[in-house]
């Protein structure tokens, strides 16, 4: 079995096929990481390509090959942040949701910053991924990235702390508050487990 | 421990990263604290909800191919990773190199190759043949005349000096010769004097002998 470290060595020795094997191995997790982070599939594809191009250019500088996955996620995360800075005006925030929620307490079942979305229509027509994507967008970025890394990429809390260069307890704390915020958002939108089970 | 202190343990427990001891501590607290029990349950529910969001295929065909190495491209790519002092050093070196290239003069005249460079432009440079005017030619001629005159002056001065040196040498030789001659004359005079003295003494002796003989003859008669 060719592990990442072996493939990196091969690539550094001039074997480009080894890099393509790395891409083939990591493109799906990285794509899904980026997709969940920025929430747009087309942008996610572009960012993923930039990510692997950057990896291709700078893999030779990576000294500790065992840290490849952490390094890869770091690059992906930085590119996502750059992308989000460009699209800052399109993101949803808790305050936006709260403000809108406060003004429509008796009205809608699901409240989003995007006011053109009809709550009932959303519940019935958007799939679970889109719903959770919108929910993730409502929580602070620093909590969202921890949830994505932990929940969808099975990273240990220590690994996340390493990637984000943040103390371990801070990571766990962000996870706690992120999950709590997500729960509140989903609850406000009237999404419960049964609904989700039905959607699936 | 307060309820807030169990949040981190809840996170560890949710993702099976909790130790046996901490698990027991958390379980004990959850049994005794309804609020935390509810909170832990909602966290579990949320994670279960999130789990239902499955990964999707990117449907992107990313294939990298090897390209011929470009040293210049690599240089500029690596430049970004250099530290500021190194970058500044390279920039200064490049500037100096550029300046020296701008102020480099290469000449091939009659098979003679000449190469000259400097950081800054030279104040007076030999004009190119195309730029020589009549005034320049006159100036050059005047300079040549002055140069020839100077050379002749120098030659004359040198000749004078050489002549003076020759006279000095000649005088010295004459003086030496004179002294030698005087010495010889002196020796000769001494010799003559000595010979004369000898002859006078001999004459005296002969005359004495003759006188004695004459006296003896006169006594014998």
Image (cartoon, grey):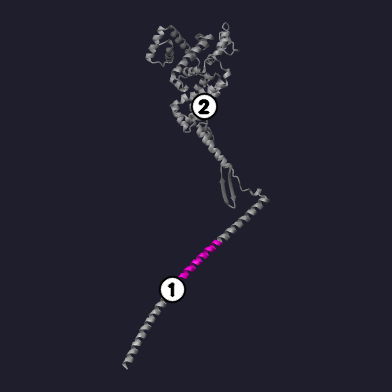
Identify the disc placed on residue A138.
none
Q: Is residue B96 visible?
A: yes
In the image shown, does A48 or B58 lie closer to the viewer? A48
Above or below: residue A55 compared with residue A173: below
Magenta span: chief secondary structure: helix
Q: Residue at x 40, y 9 (%)?
A: B29
Q: Chain of mark 2?
A: A
In the picture of the structure, the residue carrying the numbered disc 1 is B186
Q: Position of residue A118 (x, y in %)?
A: 59, 10
Q: Does residue A176 appear left or right of residue A117 in this picture?
A: left
Q: Does residue B149 appear left or right of residue A180 in this picture?
A: right
Q: Secondary structure at mark 1?
A: helix
Identify the image quadrant of residue A1. Answer: top left
How many callouts does the rendering have? 2
Q: Residue at x 44, y 72 (%)?
A: B183
Q: Which residues are magenta?
A: B160-183
**Marks 2 and 1 on same chain:** no
Q: Position of residue A182 (x, y in %)?
A: 50, 13
Q: CA distance from mark 2 to mark 1?
A: 119 Å
Q: Is residue A124 visible?
A: no
Q: Chain of mark 1?
A: B
Tell whether position B143 is magenta.
Answer: no
In the picture of the structure, the residue carrying the numbered disc 2 is A52
């Amino acid at each position: 079995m060719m592990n990442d470290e072996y493939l990196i060595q091969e690539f550094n020795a001039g074997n480009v096929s080894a890099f393509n094997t790395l891409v083939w191995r990591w493109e799906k997790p990285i794509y899904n990481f980026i997709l969940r982070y920025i929430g747009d599939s087309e942008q996610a594809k572009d960012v993923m390509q930039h990510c692997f191009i950057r990896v291709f250019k700078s893999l030779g500088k990576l000294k500790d090959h065992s840290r490849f996955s952490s390094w890869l996620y770091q690059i992906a995360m930085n590119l996502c942040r750059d992308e989000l800075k460009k699209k800052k005006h399109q993101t949803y925030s808790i305050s936006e949701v709260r403000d809108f929620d406060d003004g429509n307490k008796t009205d809608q079942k699901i409240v989003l910053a995007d006011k053109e979305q009809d709550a009932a229509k959303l519940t019935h027509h958007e799939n679970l991924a889109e719903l959770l994507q919108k929910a993730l967008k409502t929580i602070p970025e620093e909590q969202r990235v921890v949830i994505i890394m932990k929940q969808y990429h099975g990273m240990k809390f220590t690994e996340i702390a390493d990637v984000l260069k943040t103390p371990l307890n801070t990571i766990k704390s962000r996870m706690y508050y992120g999950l709590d915020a997500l729960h509140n958002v989903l609850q406000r939108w009237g999404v419960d487990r049964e609904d989700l089970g039905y959607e699936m | 421990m307060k309820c807030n202190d169990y949040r981190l343990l809840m996170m560890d427990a949710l993702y099976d990263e909790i130790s046996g001891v901490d698990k027991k501590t958390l379980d004990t607290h959850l049994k005794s604290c309804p609020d935390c029990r509810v909170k832990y349950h909602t966290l579990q529910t949320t994670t279960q909800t999130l789990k239902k969001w499955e990964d999707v295929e990117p449907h992107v065909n990313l294939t990298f191919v090897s390209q011929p190495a470009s040293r210049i491209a690599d240089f500029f790519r690596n430049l970004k990773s250099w530290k500021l002092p190194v970058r500044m050093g390279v920039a200064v070196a490049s500037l100096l190199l550029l300046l020296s290239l701008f102020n480099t003069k290469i000449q091939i005249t009659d098979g003679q190759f000449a190469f000259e460079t400097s950081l800054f432009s030279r104040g007076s440079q030999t004009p190119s043949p195309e730029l020589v005017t009549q005034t320049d030619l006159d100036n050059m001629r005047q300079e040549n005349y002055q140069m020839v005159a100077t050379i002749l002056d120098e030659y004359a001065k040198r000749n004078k000096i050489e002549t003076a040196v020759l006279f000095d040498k000649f005088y010295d030789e004459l003086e030496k010769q004179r002294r030698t001659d005087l010495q010889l004359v002196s020796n000769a005079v001494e010799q003559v004097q000595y010979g004369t003295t000898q002859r006078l003494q001999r004459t005296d002796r002969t005359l004495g002998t003759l006188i004695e003989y004459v006296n003896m003859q006169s006594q014998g008669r």
